[in-house]
Amino acid sequence: MNRSTGNDGLSARELALSEYLDSLLTEPAPEDEFCTPSDISVEREQMPQAGFAAGPPTDDSTPEYLKFQTAGLSLAIPMEKVAGEMTWSADIVPVDGSPAWILGQRQFQDRAVQIVDIAMLIIPKARRDALNSASRSRYQHVVVIGNGRWGLACEQRDDQIDLSAKQVNWRTDQGTRSWLAGTLTKDRCALLDVDAMVKLLNRGQWSEC
């Protein structure tokens, strides 16, 4: 059976993802309550101000980014912000009293890494029903950030890519979605502001949990 497609040949699912990425840059973030995982220990590390920590380069450099997939979304983070990588393992154990978006923790280079379901944090509440009931079996990989404090669970690790500032549709509104640096419209990929994301996670505050 053929999938329904739009005028540009994209499937309905691809169109929905493309429209969602576009909305990230144009629509204000919902005024949801902050998530506060008060029952888990959170280190209060000093982090840069959220907003433009991962903004456009001021020169002609082409920084390297790591792309990965989760819940049908393509995400990318600067390689310089990657503290390490792990394969999904049975060694990941649940954390008592943690919120749903904390999948568990695992030791990595002498640190207890909190594994985060990043899809649950960035996908709107109305679209999360399938994620809430999904099995962990979809995860295959963990990208470690924040000096080894946090790990982003993903289904697939893609190639590393070089990006120039001109290729990115950068976020310009500092007041919303500080975790979003920009989007790659052609690749339907969201660039994450790792410093801002880690700051929110360290504080136990996420406006779209």
Image (cartoon, rainbow, N blue to C red):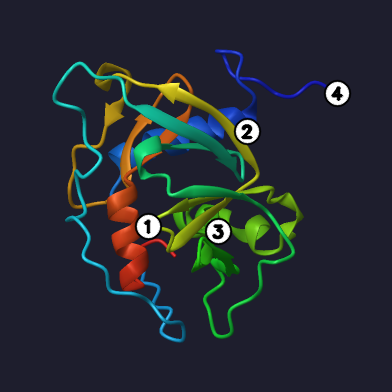
**Which structural element holds mark 2?**
helix
Inter-mark Cα distance, 4 to 1:
47 Å
The tag earlier along the polypeptide, 3 or 4, is 4
Label 3 residue SS: loop
Q: Look at 57% across and 67% down and name the residue there.
A: 107
Q: Which mark is residue 1?
A: 4
Front position among marks 2 and 3: 3
Q: Earlier in the sequence, mark 3 or mark 1?
A: 3
> Does residue 177 show up?
no
Q: If you read the primary sequence from the N terminus, does the residue marked by circle 1 or circle 2 appear first? A: 2
Q: Which residue is mark 2?
A: 13
Compare marks 2 and 3 and give the one earlier in the sequence.
Answer: 2
Give the residue at x 42% y 36%: 190
Asked if disc 4 and disc 1 are in contact, CB closer than 8 Å, the reply is no
Amino acid carrying label 3: it is Asp
Q: Which residue is mark 3?
A: 117
Residue 68: image x %, image y %?
55, 37
Instruction: Give how far apart the Cα atoms at labels 4 and 2 are.
Output: 15 Å
- From mark 3 to mark 4, how far is it between C-alphas? 32 Å
Camera-side mark, 3 or 4: 3
The part of the image, by quadrant, that contains residue 65 is top left
Mark 3 burial class by Cα count in 10 Å: few <14, some 14-19, many 20+: many
Q: Residue at x 64, y 63 (%)?
A: 132
Identify the amino acid type marked 4.
Met
Q: Position of residue 128 (x, y in %)?
A: 58, 57
- The numbered disc on residue 147 is 1
> Are the residues flagged by discs 4 and 2 in contact, CB closer than 8 Å?
no
